[in-house]
Amino acid sequence: MADLGPWLAWWLHADAVVRGVFVLLVALSVLSWAVILYKTAQLVWALRCESLALRLLEDGALTRPRLERIPRGSVARLLGEEALTYRSEAAGSALERLRERLDLLRVRRRVELENQLSVLATIGNTAPFIGLFGTVWGIMGALQGLGDGANLSIAVVSGPVGEALTATAGGLFTAIPAVVGYNLLVRLIRRISVAAAASQQVVVEQVDALVAGPQGEAARGGLA
């Protein structure tokens, strides 16, 4: 317990506001780490699914049995299921509607993957200011306590000021992981979006070939 004395001294001498700021920062830190761990697991799994789906789509024609091999919940699976509903329609306007529908599905899935990222952005932006508020409040209280000028010295001032600066340190400790986690997760989402866009292009090309059929091939051969 003797070793813990210096770490607990600032808490014992801090007022309710500084203590509340520190408790809030601890709660925000726990929340940010929970979001980081959850989203990392979700996005890594999604990236693996999209990479696998892209390989499966590129290796063969778009068929129901091949589509069943693509993991559920992946963007490529949603795009493939939507595309199969259009394969029996005429090429022209149906393919254009298909492209629009696939674009909408891909954007909607990206929005779903971005859920909870605003929590990290908010914590990363506000935590330093919350810590700074606690520091300013603590310094104000320390200076008010020394207003009478009695026994004024560096040793008397440094203690309360050092305790108040703990709030700023807590704010930085909370904000830095949130900002780093946010940037890494955004990068993962971009990679997933690139894989999904590639899968969409493959799906559209395969549906175009299925709709065109032998007549489309013959027409292209005649034009050549």
Image (cartoon, rainbow, N blue to C red):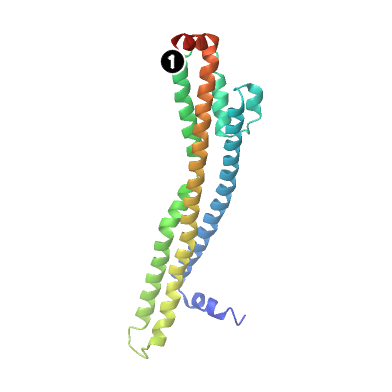
Vertical relation: 74 (above or below) 219: below
Image quadrant of residue 77?
top right
| Lateral position of residue 194 relative to residue 2, left or right | left
Type of residue at label 1? Ser
Q: How many marks?
A: 1
Residue 3 pos. (x, y %): 59, 80
Residue 28 pos. (x, y %): 50, 58
Vertical relation: 158 (above or below) 212: below
| Lateral position of residue 74 relative to residue 142, left or right | right
Which residue is at the front of the view, 74 or 161? 74
Residue 71 pos. (x, y %): 63, 34
Residue 114 visible somewhere in the drawing: no
Vertical relation: 79 (above or below) 220: below
Image quadrant of residue 135?
bottom left
Near mark 1 (Cα within 10 A), the count class, few <14, some 14-19 or many ≥20, is few
Position of the C terminus, as image quadrant, is: top left
Q: Which residue is mark 1?
A: 93
Residue 175 pos. (x, y %): 46, 60
Residue 5 visible somewhere in the drawing: yes
Vertical relation: 192 (above or below) 178: above
Residue at 51% of width from left, 77% of height from top? 12
Residue at 57% of width from left, 36% of height from top? 50
Which residue is at the front of the view, 159 or 96? 96
Which residue is at the front of the view, 4 or 219? 219
| Lateral position of residue 64 relative to residue 133, left or right | right
Dot 1: element: helix
